[in-house]
Image (cartoon, rainbow, N blue to C red):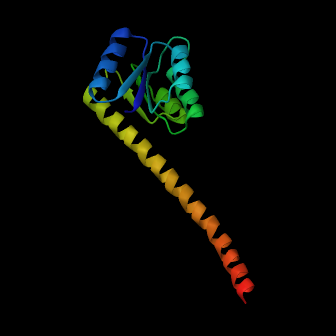
Amino acid sequence: MENILIVDDEKAILDMMAETISRWGYNPITADNGDTAIEKIHNTPIDLLLTDFRLPKRNGIELVKEIKEVDPTTKAILFTGYSGIDNAIDAFNAGVSDYLVKPVDLTELHEKIDSQLNNRKVGKKFKTIKSLNWGMLISIPIWLILGIIFIKLLG
């Protein structure tokens, strides 16, 4: 079950999102401010960060930067009541995977969560395959050298 950290300073929104995300089969972890979120980021593996832009103590973009330092594969969806292009640009530059404007449509949110978590899984599989390919490429010359040595020993 994937861990989704939900960060919002509005308790009603936080509780509603946690309950909804739990019904969708994910494990919601909640924080009502940036500092609490940072603690959870460092103490719990997070698969997806779902955060409001404006928060007490730290904003959503700061949280995204922090979580990307802890685990660059973690996806992040930022939601905000402000639809300014500058906020969106700053968010994507910080590593936000997706962006929603409040009020958040739950169907759209569900689709975005599923999509981002699927992208994360695919990215991890690709990284594993890439590592295996490098391992194979490195091992080929070693086997060739060992083969040549073996032939010389027999000959």
Residue at 39% in and 19% down = 81
Marks counted in the figure total 0
Q: Is residue 107 left or right of residue 32?
A: left
Q: Position of residue 74 (x, y in %)?
A: 49, 35
Residue at 66% in and 79% down = 147
Determine which quarter of the picture holds residue 35.
top right
Q: The C terminus is located in which quarter?
A: bottom right
Please identify the residue farthest to the bottom as the structure is shown: 155
Between 22 and 77, which is closer to the camera in this rendering? 22
User: In the figure, 84 relative to 112: above or below?
Assistant: above
Q: Is residue 139 left or right of residue 154?
A: left
Between 69 and 22, which is closer to the camera in this rendering? 22
Between 130 and 147, which is closer to the camera in this rendering? 147
Q: The N terminus is located in which quarter?
A: top left
Q: Is residue 20 left or right of residue 44?
A: left
Residue at 42% in and 44% down = 121
Q: Position of residue 37 (x, y in %)?
A: 51, 19
Q: Position of residue 42 (x, y in %)?
A: 57, 24
User: In the figure, 57 relative to 21: above or below?
Assistant: above
Q: Position of residue 113 (x, y in %)?
A: 35, 34
Determine which quarter of the picture holds residue 106.
top left
Please identify the residue farthest to the front as the structure is shown: 154
User: In the figure, 121 relative to 109: above or below?
Assistant: below
Q: Is residue 111 left or right of residue 42?
A: left
